[in-house]
Image (spheres, rainbow, N blue to C red):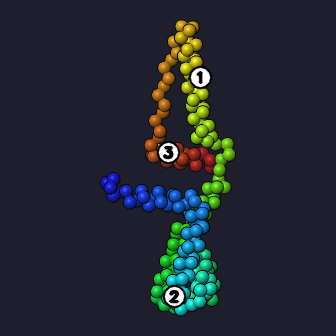
Amino acid sequence: MEPLLLPFRWIYRGLVWFANSPRTLITSYLLMIVVAGVIYGQVEQRSAADAVWWAVVTASTVGYGDISPTTWAGRALAALLISTMVLLVIPLITAHFASRLIVDDDAFEHVEQEELKNDVRRMRALLEELAARQGIALPELPPPPAPPDHATLVRQRLRGRRNRR
């Protein structure tokens, strides 16, 4: 089963890399416009300016109707361009900018979390040393709780939604 999932992992990692780089997103958008414009210009016998205009209007799904494909190859290109933009590029751009807006400024960064863990370890060591000097037995620390499984998380979320109503 693992080898079958490997290509999907590669695709997922590629999409994550692609989506996390604004430069890559914008470059790919512009590259798609130029490539689609050049191909459209060749297939439909249009000028470069008209072809790029068509690509921008089609990719943005505005569709003014002033320029439209007349050949099947042009229509197939339009369908591919629209599908790619609507299903992949525009959602990735939107998600990237939305993730930049939804940032918890109060959230601990990884470095801060590690510092806190180290502080707790040092305090525990000092407490154990002090308890040993005083002859006090410290209780054993309980093991950390296991992370909840998927079903438990879903139940907790559903319970939280019901309680909000």
**In the figure, 60 relative to 15: above or below?**
below
**In the figure, 30 relative to 118: above or below?**
below
- Nearest to viewer (mark 2 / mark 1): 2
Helix, strand or loop under label 3: helix
**Count of numbered circles on the image:** 3
- Nearest to viewer (mark 3 / mark 2): 2
Is any atom of residue 59 visible in this view? yes
> As shown in the figure, which amino acid type bears the numbered disc 3?
Leu
Relative image position of residue 78 (x, y in whole percent): 52, 81
**In the figure, 103 relative to 88: above or below?**
above
Helix, strand or loop under label 2: helix
What residue is disc 1 on?
123
> As shown in the figure, which amino acid type bears the numbered disc 1?
Met
Say which mark, if any, is on residue 42. Answer: 2
What residue is disc 3 on?
153
For the point 64% across and 55% down, which residue is it? 100
Q: Quadrant of the N terminus?
A: bottom left
> As shown in the figure, which amino acid type bears the numbered disc 2?
Gln
